[in-house]
Image: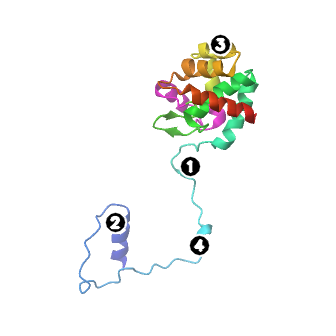
Amino acid sequence: MHNVLIVLVSIILGVMPLPTIAQPSVIKEPIAPQVQMTEQKQPKQLSEVVLPPLAETANIPAPSQPVDNETATWNFLIGQGFSRNQTAGIMGNLQQEHNFNTSDVPGGLGIAQWMSGRRDNLMARPNYLDINVQLQYLMDELNTGESAAKAGILASDSLENAVYVFSSKFERCGTCHNEQRVAYAYQILGRH
């Protein structure tokens, strides 16, 4: 019985390959041995089993939820001194980029889909998948290396112009689909 348990654990851990199935007349021990557990270790229901969150086990922060991120983004940008039209223009771009999702995907990282060195700089920050961290990073960029984008947005007198300035000077997207970005910006303005 002990040898069967060692083989099973070795197979599960990948130390030993899965054996070929022998003829029934050759098997001398039961295939599914009974493993006795004490009452304290055996949960009575599946709902009693507590597993740590995947992000915690992988030591990666969990992304923020997009449903809450839109309002957080609106409040943050208004608080930074952008007008309602300018804020909606920036946010129309962010919705087009990743729908206010802070996660990391093959096309980029976070709400602005940062790539290359900009992505690396964001990842160097603790809790980089948190919406507040990403919004502060966005502002840090607008106040430093992307200051031309900020100046252009602040000079914008229309929602459409704010969309175009952000997409061309901050996002620098190849195929921007600005019509969709403008449509998103108007929807966002209507919700706030």
The one nearer the camera, 13 or 112, is: 112
- Residue 61 falls in image quadrant: top right
- Horizontally, residue 58 falls left or right of residue 2, namely right
Q: CA distance from mark 4 to mark 2?
A: 25 Å
Which secondary structure lies at badge 3? Answer: helix
Please, what is the three-letter code of the amino acid marked with disc 4? Pro
Residue type marked 1? Glu
- Amino acid residing under circle 2: Ile
Coordinates of residue 27 in the picture (x, y in percent) = 27, 83
Q: Is residue 41 magenta-colored?
A: no
Alpha-carbon distance for marks 3 and 1?
40 Å
In this picture the colour scheme is rainbow
What range is drawn magenta here? Answer: 113-134
* Quadrant of the snapshot with the N terminus: bottom left
**Picture residue at 68% right of the left edge, 30% below the top:** 186
**SS under mark 2:** helix
Residue 84 occupies which quadrant of the picture? top right
Q: Is residue 115 above or below residue 100?
A: above
Does residue 118 appear in the picture of this structure?
yes
Per the image, the residue denoted by label 4 is: 43
Instruction: From this view, report whether residue 55 is shown above or below residue 73.
Output: below
- First of labels 3, 4 by sequence position: 4
Residue 124, image x, y percentages: 54, 31
Ranked by sequence position, the earlier of labels 1 and 4 is 4
Decide which of tag 3 and tag 2 comes sooner along the chain.
2
